[in-house]
Amino acid sequence: MLFLGMAIITGCTKKDTEDPVTNSVASCEGCHTNYAHLQKVYSPDTAAPPGGCGGEAPHYEPYDRVYMGGDGYKAFKESGHYKTGCVGCHKGIGNTDDKTLAHSGDFISHPSLFSEETCGTCHKAIVDNFKTSIHQGTGQKRKVTLRSGLSGPDDFNKLPAHQIEGYNKNCATCHASCGECHIVRPPIGGGGLAKGHDFTKTPDMVTVCVTCHVSRGGHAYLGVASGTQPDVHLTQAGYRCVNCHDGDEMHGDGKKVEQRYAYEKLPTCDECHTGIATKNTYHSIHYKSFNCQVCHSQNYNNCGSCHIHGLGARVPSYLGFKIAVNPLPVIKKDFDFTLVRRTLAAPDNWEVYGVPLYANFAVLPTYNYTSPHNILRWTDRTKTTAGQSCYSNCHIRNENGTLVNKNLYLFADDLLSWEAVASAGIVVDGKLPPAWFAK
């Protein structure tokens, strides 16, 4: 009896402490938690990881991208998503050690690409709204479509198939589905499971947000560039992206917009900084003339003339600062002048995809309205030394034939030859006070 009791106790103890998935690869979970087995059966990559404005994506081995392990996996097992089961989202065939069979039939590697039938079964409102989210690339697709001679974003799918292929391969690597923010690394971040398949409700600022928004958002906010400082909202308040850009904005509200600045849920400075319109003399004079960044931004990253698939940006990345006539007078009605940033657009963007030149390149300027995320209270514009006027660092003035501060503004002679017609409407020539130029 004593021997039998010991055997029963030993058997129960072994069963309770063992993780059954480590004993068999004849299941989705068993395979994807067995690192050695994944190394044996993985399929090598057939293409290099996608690159982007932030550079080449880091490389993770195929078996590392699909391995479920570590603290993230433990958290996943305790979540409601785990109870759905692998085939509940990914479909395919479960309970088999045959990789080909497991991934056959209606198998979906990235379920959130089919969010209505996967994520939407539980998160219907979010999925429905996300169809019009700015993360879908609406604004970028609109510009490609208009420059191609078509009427708008709904016509994007009418573009030549080869051009759409080029867009998806080169431009859409940062446009997110649910998974890219909440489960896996964005493609430009190397792809693959970020935390053992755990679902992260609030995406990490650096490994998710900045991974995609690196060259123009994170680059500025973190103060990466030589001679710049991190944004005051980071250093003084410790703000992460989601402090201003919350889930309602990221997920969308179901209303279709032509581009991101038309989106109603974008945060504005005066939501937190109440009463700033009359806070001081400078604000009282200029609040309806400039966007706040004209005075409170540092120099910010620019590049341009992107040759899709091959040469990259033919105007290499540089720090710049340009004030121009407001390119969005209908959307941003309050401002006469705003900061602008050079776009990637060039007449021959799609040459290697069978489109030698845009049909209607000049329909849009080559500089966009911009609101750099590198705010400081005291900048090269707002700081003055003893004896200087408040406008010494921003108004143009003629000093013995030299136009001081002219470099801050976008003039026609700043444009490259192929930009001249497209951007003629936003240059400041003839639109600034004549007294600024008088000797």
Image (cartoon, rainbow, N blue to C red):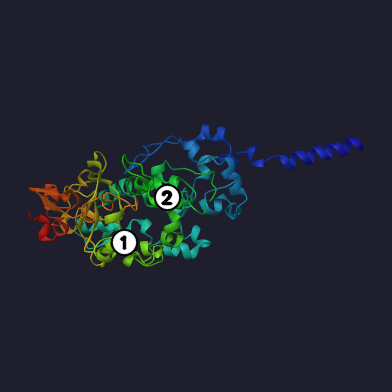
Q: Nearer the viewer, residue 110 or 384?
A: 384
Q: Residue at x 64, y 41 (%)?
A: 21
Label 2, label 1: how many angstroms apart (C-alpha)? 23 Å
Residue 261's label in the rendered image is 1
Q: Residue 375: x, y in percent?
A: 34, 52
Mark closer to the observer (2, 1): 2
Q: Residue at x 31, y 54 (%)?
A: 296
Q: Which of the 4 image quadrants contains residue 5? A: top right
Q: Residue at x 30, y 61 (%)?
A: 259
Q: Which of the 4 image quadrants contains residue 271? A: bottom left
The kind of residue tagged 1 is Tyr
Q: Earlier in the sequence, mark 2 or mark 1?
A: 2
> What residue does disc 2 label?
234
Q: Secondary structure at mark 1?
A: helix
Q: Using a 10 Å C-alpha cutoff, classify the residue at mark 1 as few (fewer than 14 neighbours), some (14 to 19) or many (20 or more).
A: some
Q: Is residue 271 above or below residue 9?
A: below
Q: Nearer the viewer, residue 171 or 274?
A: 274
Q: Nearer the viewer, residue 423 or 15?
A: 423
Q: Residue 27: x, y in percent?
A: 59, 43
Question: Is residue 87 among the parts visible in the rendering?
Answer: yes
Q: Is residue 297 above or below residue 258?
A: above
| Residue 124 falls left or right of residue 428 | right
The kind of residue tagged 2 is Leu
Q: Which of the 4 image quadrants contains residue 178? A: bottom left
Q: Residue at x 34, y 53 (%)?
A: 377
Question: Is residue 97 among the parts visible in the rendering?
Answer: no
Q: Residue 109: x, y in percent?
A: 47, 47
Residue farthest to the right? 1
Quadrant into which the N terminus falls? top right
Q: Residue 400: x, y in percent?
A: 8, 48
Q: Nearer the viewer, residue 40 or 65?
A: 65
Q: Secondary structure at mark 2?
A: helix
